[in-house]
Amino acid sequence: MPPLCPAALCALLLTVGAAWGQSVSFNGSLGAQSALLLIDGEARTVALGQSVRGVKLLALEDGRATVEFGGRRQVLVLGASPGRIGDGTAAAGAGRKIVLASGPGGHFVTQGSINGQATQFLVDTGATTVAIAQIEAERMGLKFREGRRVMTQTANGTVPAHLLQLASVRVGEVEVRNVDAIILPGNMSHVLLGNSFLTRFQMRRENDVMTLELRY
């Protein structure tokens, strides 16, 4: 009987298996000495100088984590797309899961984009929709004045606002399309990531870590 795996074929299979690559993203700081990293779709807390699943955390500062994996050093930006070693094939779970670490005051803040324009989000489970300040909407080029005009209640009283549907809201590798939003006059420190986005996910919180996984 011929061998089940000739030497040349076995070598080829090993090479292909190794080329799938490893995916690593920086999802938040847990104090000044630890980072929350998403390694091949799995959330792991990694201390400075520690190695987890072949990923070593070298430095942590100013929304950036310097790591070493696959024999290379790479700087990961908070909330950006994962760094990869290999052929760039997405890891299992990539594009379906968001993992966030709480920041000052217990708030969950992350970088992302709306219709391809970079912005900063604050998770707000009490907000009905994604809420964007008019100044930020203008910066991103949103044509909110074409949306439906409504009156809404704020801390400053009843004010005019505009409803519209965002083509896409993206956080890390996860993109959700056709998301309802409200544009409010004035300015806010963040875009509020409300329930028109959050209800698309199964939400789980464990201590200082929040995980959002797409329902479909």
Image (cartoon, rainbow, N blue to C red):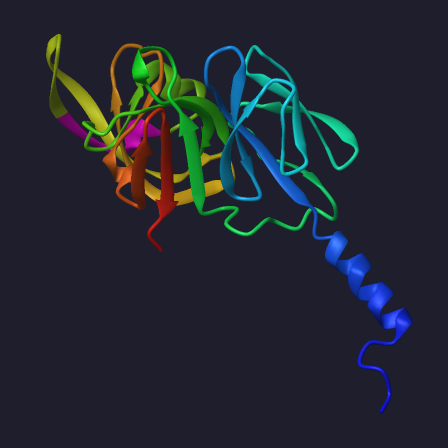
Q: Which residues are magenta?
A: 143-150
Determine if the magenta segment contains residue 172.
no
Q: Position of residue 112 (x, y in %)?
A: 46, 28
Residue reaching furthest to the bottom? 1
Determine if the magenta segment contains residue 145.
yes
Which residue is painted at 68% across and 36% down in the image? 54
Q: For this rendering, which residue is in front, 138 or 43?
A: 43
Q: Position of residue 212 (x, y in %)?
A: 36, 40
Would you say 31 lies left or right of 154 here? Answer: right
Quadrant assignment for the C terminus: bottom left
Which residue is painted at 85% across and 91% down in the image? 1
Q: Position of residue 35 (x, y in %)?
A: 53, 22
Which residue is painted at 31% across and 38% down in the image? 204
Residue 85 visible to an observer of this rendering: yes
Would you say 22 lies left or right of 117 here? Answer: right
Q: Position of residue 3 (x, y in %)?
A: 85, 82
Residue 197 visible to an observer of this rendering: no
Badge count: 0
Q: For this rendering, which residue is in front, 48 or 155?
A: 48
